[in-house]
Image (cartoon, grey):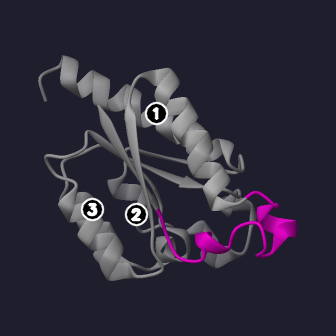
Amino acid sequence: MRVLVLHGPNLNMLGTRETGIYGTGTLDEIDAELEKLATELGVEVECFQSNSEAALVDRLQGSRGRVHAIVFNPAAFTHYSIVLRDAVAGLGLPVVEVHLTNVHAREDFRRQSVVAPVAAGQISGFGSDSYLLGLRAAVALASREAAAGV
């Protein structure tokens, strides 16, 4: 089983960007934690970060037939990117939306996700553990679909 992990804009700046909000951990550290958990779960992960909406759409569209599930942190695109929402909706794959911070406890504009209604679920507020929980959820969802012959 293969899971695609997508990181949206500005996540490449983790560790130096607004450390009071996002902490001092880096994206490379998150990816390493994901690789370790994937090994424990017996799955493969493919991690990709982009600040470009188009590059994220291309990865989503290119995932069909290659991966079984997706863990996706759309970052700021969460709140307004209809093109990412539509790309997720058209996949036919389980997508778990993740966020490092509790977006529902932050500014009003961060409480709205246009992606969440077409995702299998959303995990937020657990720092880097949000990604690990998201990977576990994605693997569970993909396993259930495989067992059901979906």
Query: Sequence-wise, which precedes: disc 1 or disc 2?
Result: 2
Report, in whole angstroms, how far the alpha carbon at label 1 lies from the one at label 2. 17 Å
- The answer to whether the residue labelled 1 contacts the one labelled 2, judged by CB atoms less than 8 Å apart, is no
Q: Position of residue 33 (x, y in %)?
A: 62, 41
Which residue is more in the foreground, 118 or 55?
Answer: 55
Report, in whole angstroms, how far the alpha carbon at label 3 lies from the one at label 1. 18 Å
Residue 18: in magenta span? yes
Position of residue 138 in the picture relative to residue 108 (left or right): left
Q: Position of residue 96 (x, y in %)?
A: 43, 47
Position of residue 139 in the picture relative to residue 150 (left or right): right
Report, in whole angstroms, how far the alpha carbon at label 2 lies from the one at label 3. 13 Å
For discs 1 and 2, the disc positioned in front in the rendered view = 1
Which residue is more in the foreground, 107 or 140?
Answer: 140
- Residue at which label 2 appears: 115
Q: Amino acid at mark 2?
A: Val
Q: Amino acid at mark 3?
A: Leu
Q: Position of residue 45 (x, y in %)?
A: 40, 42
Q: In the current view of this chain or complex, which residue is farthest to the right?
A: 20
Q: Position of residue 50 (x, y in %)?
A: 45, 74
Q: Is residue 20 above or below residue 102?
A: below
- Residue at which label 1 appears: 137
The quadrant of the picture occupied by the C terminus is: top left
Position of residue 119 in the picture relative to residue 89 (left or right): right
- Residue at which label 3 appears: 60
Q: Is residue 66 above or below residue 137?
A: below
The quadrant of the picture occupied by the N terminus is: top left
Q: Is residue 101 above or below residue 58?
A: above
- Label 3 sits on a secondary structure element that is helix
| Chain part drawn in magenta | 7-25
Q: Quadrant of residue 143?
A: top left
Position of residue 116 in the picture relative to residue 14 (left or right): left
